[in-house]
Amino acid sequence: MTLGALAAPLGVLGFVRPHLDWHALAPELTLLGVGALLTCLDIAMAERGRAFTSALAGLGLLGVLVPIITLAVAGVASEPRVMFDGAYVVDGYALILKALFVVSGYVVVLLSMNYVAEGDYWENEYYGLVLASLLGMVVMASARDLISIFVALELLSIPAYLLAAWRKRDLRSNEAGLKYFLMGVFASAIMLYGMSLLFGASGSTVLADIAAAAPLDRGADAVPSAAVTVGVIFVLVGFAFKVSAFPFHTWAPDTYEGAPTPITAFLSVASKTAGFVALGSLVFVGFWERDDVYGPALWFLAAASMTAGNLMALRQKNIVRLMAYSGIAQAGFMLAPLAVAGVNTEVADQAVSAVLTYLVIYAAMNLGVFAVIMTVARRTGTGDVASYNGLFKVSPGMAVVMTVFLASLAGVPPAGGWYAKFAVFQALVSADNPSGYVLAGFAAVNAVIAVGYYGKIAARMWFEKPAPELGDAGRIPVPFSLRSALALTVAATLVFGVVPATVTHFTDVSLLATVTGL
Amino acid sequence: MDAFLNGWGLTLVTFVPLVGAALVMALPSGRELWVKAAALGASLVTALFAIFLLARFSVSRAGELQYVVDRSWIDVINSRYIMGIDGISLPLLLLTALIVPLCIVYSFGHFPEPRNPKAFLALLLVLETGMIGTFVAQDLILFFVFFEVVLLPMYFMIGVWGGENRRYAAIKFFLYTLFGSALMLVSFLAMFFLADGTLAGLDVARTFDMRALSGGATAAIARTSQLWIFAGMFLGFGIKVPMFPFHTWLPDAHTEAPTVGSVILAAVLLKLGTYGFVRVAVPMLPEAAAAWAPVIGLLAVIGIIYGALGCLAQRDMKRLIAFSSVAHMGFVMLGIATLTPFGINAAVFGMVAHGLITGMLFFLAGSVKDRYHTMEMSRLGGLLQQAPRMGWILGFCVMASLGLPGLAGFWGEFPAILASYNPAEILNEAVFRAYMVIAAIGTVLAAGYLLWMLQKTAFGNAREEFADSPDVTDATPREYLAWAPLLVLIVVLGFFPRLLHEATDPAVRESLQVEAVNGSPGDCLEVERGEECFERLRRVGEQAGSGR
C-alpha cells in the first residue's frame, strides 16, 4: 500500500509535487554535485586526493557557469522562472548575481591554491566548505521568501565560520572564527525575531505577499504599525551585520586579520555581496512601500558606514585591517542607493542597478587587492603597510597593478571604481529630494577622504625606499594561479572602467517589475 | 584624408599618447635610448595629427564643432562617445600637443632623481591623453573621465620626482582636485536629471551631450537649482584654476614638482579649470553664471592682488612664479566673469599666453636650479654675467609675463581689464568698474615682482660660492631646442593676436548665443532686466518641453 493510499482517507496528506524547473535549478544542482563529488573523493582517496582537489573545485565552478549562461541565453531576464509560489525566482537579477558569486568563488579558489597547499592544512575540506558556502549564496540570489532567505543565509554563513578559523594552530585565526560565529549567530537571532514579527503582521513568508499585505502597503496604512517597524528594522540589522555596516561592523577587522587571506577575500566580496542581495530582495520586493521605515534606517547606516569606515581606515597600520575598514566604507556607498529606493519606481530601478553595478565592480577590484596582498606577503610575511614601501622599485609590475586597484577603489577613472561611484551618485541624485542630495554630498566628501588612505599606500609603493622586508632577491615571484587571478581582476577592473556598458548591460534590471508588474 | 580626419582625427590625437605610453612600458628598461625615442616619437605623431587637424580646420566655421564623432558608449545613462573641436578647443589642443614633445626633449639629458625615464615618460604620455581628451570631449561624462585621468600621473610625477616636501605636495594636490571634481560630478548629474534635451532638439530628455546642454536644454531648470549646480561646478573648476581661496595647493605643487611637471601644470593643467568655465559652466547655465559673476569677479581680483603680494613675499624663485600664476589666472577669470564675448576671448587668449610664458618661466627656473642647485633668490645673481644668453631669455620672458605690448601676455591681460569696464548688461556696471581699477593696480604690482625677480637672479655679480662653479654654463642646444618654439610663439602671437582671435571669436560668440526651441538664453545676458528674461524663457521652455 502506498503512502498516498494510506493518507487518502485522511484527506490532509495529499501531497502534490510543486512544479520544478530543472533548467532553472541547474546551477545550484551542479554546485551541489561538485561539492558532493569532492567530499566523496576525499573519503575514497584520502591523502592522494590532495593533488587535484583544488583544480577540480576550480573546474567545477567554471562548469556551474554553463547552466547560468544557457539560462541567460534562454531569456530568463525577460521571462523570470518562478517556483514554489514565488518563493524562488530565477530572473535577471538572480542570474547576474549567481554569475558574480561563481566567478568570485573561482578567483578565491585561484587565490587559495598556493596558500592552502603551502600551509600544511587539509585541503579537501577547505574547498568543500567554500563550495557549500557558495551554494548558499547562489540560493540567496533567487530566494524571495523569508524562510528560504534564512536557510540560504545559514548555508552560506556556517561554512564561512569554519573557514575563518581554518588556521587552527593560530590563536588569531581562532579568535577570528569565534568572533565571526558569535556575532553572526547574534545577528541571525535578531533577524529571525524580525522575520517572525513580519510573518505575524502579514500572514505570509513570501516577500511578494508580504508586500501586498495591508500593514506593509502604504496606501492602506499611512503610519506603520509597531510590529512592522520593529520587524523591518530587525531584519535590516541582521543583514547590516553581514555587510559589516557601521555600527554592526565590529567583527570585521579582527575576523579579516585572523582568517586565512583567501577567506578574507571571500568574506569581503562574496559574503558581503550575499548580504546585499538579501537586502535588495527585501527592500525592493518585500518592504518597498514602507520606505518611511527602511529609508531613514538605511540612510543612517549608509552615511555612518562610509564616514566611520573611512575615518578609522585612515589610522590603520595593517593592510588587511585597512581593507576591512575600507570595506565598511564601501558598504556605506552600496547601501546609499537603497536608502532612497522608495521614492518612485524609476528611482528604485536606478537604485537596484547602481547596487548591482557597484557589487560587480567592487568584486573585481577588491579580489585584485587581496591577490596583490597575498603575493607580497609571500615575500614579506607581514601585513604591515610599511612593508609596501618602495614596492615600485622592487616589483614594478606588482606596484602598477596595485595602483590600478587602489585607484579603482578610490574612484579615479579610468579604473572601474569610478563608474560604480558614479552609478551611486546617479541613483541618489535621481531621487531629487533633500535626503538624496545630502547623502550624495556625504558620499562626495567621503570619496575624497578615502583617497587619503588609498593614496597613502600608493605613495608608499612609489615614493619610498624599499622596505627591508622586501629583501634584495629582486622581483617577487608570482605563482601561476595568483598570476591568473591578477590578470583576470586587472583586466576586469580596466574594462569596466573604460567600457562601463560591459557591466550595465547585465545590471540594468528591475526587481519591482517582476513582482508588482509595474 | 578629410574623411579619415573627420572620422578618426580626434580619437587618434587623444589616444596615440596612450599607445605610446603602453609601448614605453613594454620596452626593456635597460634600453634607455629606445624608451626615449618611443616616447618622443609618440608625442611627435600626436603633434603631427594636431597639425593635420589645424590644417584642415575651417576657420570660417570656427564657431561650429568640427571633426565630430558621435558613437554609443554607456547607453544606460545616455552617455555617448562624442568628440569635436571648435575655435576654443583648437588652440588649447595645439598648445598641449606642442608642450609635451618640448618637455620630452628638455628632459632628455637630465631626468630628475630617481631617474627611471621609462616610468617618467610613460606618465607624461598618459597625462597628455588626459589633457587632450578633456579639450576635445563633448559629452560631460567623457569630459569628466579625461579630467580625472590627469590626476594620477601628476600625483606620481610630483610624488616620485619632486623635491623635499614632495609627498605632502602630491597628496595635497590630489585631495584638493578630487574634492572639487566629486562635487562637480554631482552637479553634472543634477543637470542630467533636470535638463530637458528635447528643448535642444534631441529626442531624449536626459542627456550628457554638451552640445545639447549648452544649446538650450538647461533653460527650463529652476533658478535655485541652477545656482546650486553652478556652485558645484564652480568648486570643481575653481580649484583647478586655482581661484583665490582654493589656490593653496598650487605653490606647494609647483615648488615640489620636477621642472617638466611644473611646466605641464602651468601650461596646460590649470587651463582645464578655465576651459571648464568657458565650455561647461557659463554656456550651460548662463543665468546662474550671471548670478555668480560678481562673486567670480571679486575672487578673481582678490586673486590678482593676493597673488601679486604673495610673489613679493617669496624668497624661492619657483614659488614666486607659482604665485604669479595665481595672479594671471585671476585676469583670465575676470575676463570670463564679464560674460561678454570680448572678455571671454581675452580669457582664452590669456590661457594660451599664460601657457606659453609661464611654461617658459618654469623651464628657466628648472635650468637655473640645475646650474645653481638652489632656488633661493638671495643666493642667486649674476646670471647675465655667467650665462648671458639664458639671462636674456629670462629677461624676455619676464617682460612677456608682465604684459609688455607686442608680446603675447599683453593680449591676455589688457583686454580682460578693458572688458570689465563694460560687462554684460545683466551685471552691475559699477561693481565691475571697481574690479577693473583693482585689476589695473595688479598689473603694476606684477611689473614690480617680476622685475624684482629678474634683478635678484640675473643682475649684479654672481655669488662667490658659484663664481667658479663648473655647473654654471650657458643654455645648451637641447634647451634651445625645447625653448625656441615657445619664444617664437610669444612674439608671433604678440604681433598677430588675430591668428588666435580669428578662431576663438566665432566660437565664443556661438557659445554665448544659442538657438534653442524657446529662444536664446544668451540674449538675456545683454538686457538689463535679465532675470525676467530668463524667467520668461523658462516658462516657454516648460511648455515646449517633454512635459516632465
Image (tube, helix red, strand yellow):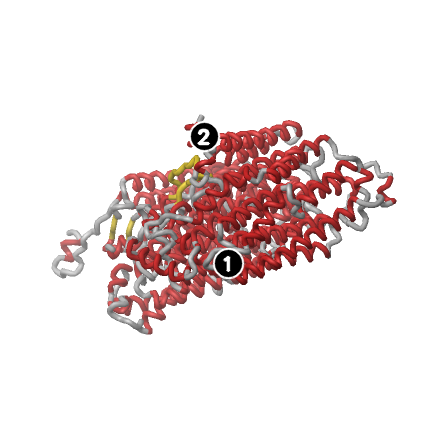
Q: Which chain letter goes with mark 2?
A: B
Residue plotted at (54% across, 62% down): B431
Q: Are marks 1 and 2 in contact (CB under 8 Å)?
A: no
Task: Give me the C-alpha separation between circle 1 and circle 2.
Answer: 38 Å
Residue A198: x and y in percent read 31, 67
Q: Which residue is mark 2?
A: B5
Q: Which residue is mark 1?
A: B293
Kindly indicate the quadrant of the structure image that contains residue B118: top right
Could one spot residue A332 in this view of the protein? no
Residue A352: x and y in percent read 36, 54
Residue B177: x and y in percent read 56, 52
* Camera-side residue of B192 and A331: B192
Question: What is the secondary structure assignment of the residue under circle 2?
Answer: helix
Question: Amino acid under label 2?
Answer: Leu
Question: Amino acid under label 1?
Answer: Ala
1 or 2: tag closer to the N-terminus: 2
